[in-house]
């Protein structure tokens, strides 16, 4: 999957629940757009969310970033993982606490069952912390094979989610 692809919209979900969560999210935005190949389109509001799954842990700050890119999905994954690593991400307990999580939710309408990068993200349609901020920046968004983000959000209940208007990400 090397070489340049046609420009397409990507959706990235950012989350942090260890250390200075807002600094981690802003540092992720800065690092993701510091190198060429990824052009920002929109940054969602920041939400504070209860953890979903995994061990007992502190609440997350979450946001969604949309961007345009010509990078192949595997190169985008390498960038996302490099940003996580640079900001102290340690992969230990599944769904455990983390300084930074950068999930690739969608790359255009691309579909992939590759275990290294499944597209669209296999659980995005179940997670209010992805769907709510994504719908804020793109109310007409759809998840390939799943449906409209707003419809999926309406179907997800019981997930604690609070918009933090006192926090703002910037490119």
Image: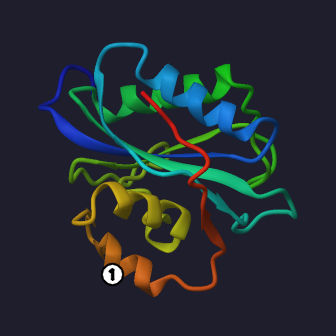
Location of the C terminus by quadrant is: top left
Q: Quadrant of residue 77?
A: top left
- In this picture, residue 2 sits left or right of residue 83: left
Q: Quadrant of residue 83?
A: top right
- The residue furthest right is 56
Q: Residue at x 63, y 77 (%)?
A: 159
Rendered view: 38 above or below 45 = above
Rendered view: 110 above or below 40 = below
Q: Residue at x 21, y 27 (%)?
A: 70
Would residue 122 be visible to someone looking at this image? Answer: no
Location of the N terminus by quadrant is: top left
- The residue furthest front is 166
Q: Quadrant of residue 101?
A: top right
- In this picture, residue 42 sits left or right of residue 164: left
Question: Badge 1: few (under 14), some or many (20 or more) residues near its Cα, within 10 Å?
Answer: few
Spot occupied by residue 99 in the image (x, y as percentages of width and height) = 74, 37
């Amino acid at each position: 999957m090397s070489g340049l692809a046609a420009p397409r919209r990507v959706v990235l979900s950012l989350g942090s629940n260890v250390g200075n969560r807002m600094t981690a999210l802003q540092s992720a935005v800065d690092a993701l757009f510091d190198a060429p190949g990824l052009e920002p389109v929109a940054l969602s509001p920041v939400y504070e969310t209860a953890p979903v799954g995994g061990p007992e842990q502190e609440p997350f700050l979450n946001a969604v970033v949309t961007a345009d890119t010509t990078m192949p999905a595997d190169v985008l994954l390498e960038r996302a993982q490099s940003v996580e690593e640079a900001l102290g991400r340690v992969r230990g307990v599944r769904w455990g606490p983390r300084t930074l999580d950068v999930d690739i939710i969608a790359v255009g309408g691309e579909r992939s069952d590759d275990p290294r990068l499944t597209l669209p993200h296999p659980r995005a349609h179940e997670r209010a912390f992805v769907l709510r901020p994504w719908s804020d920046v793109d109310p007409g968004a759809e998840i390939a094979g799943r449906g409209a983000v707003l419809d999926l959000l309406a179907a997800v209940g019981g997930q604690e989610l609070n918009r933090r208007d006192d926090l703002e990400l910037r490119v």
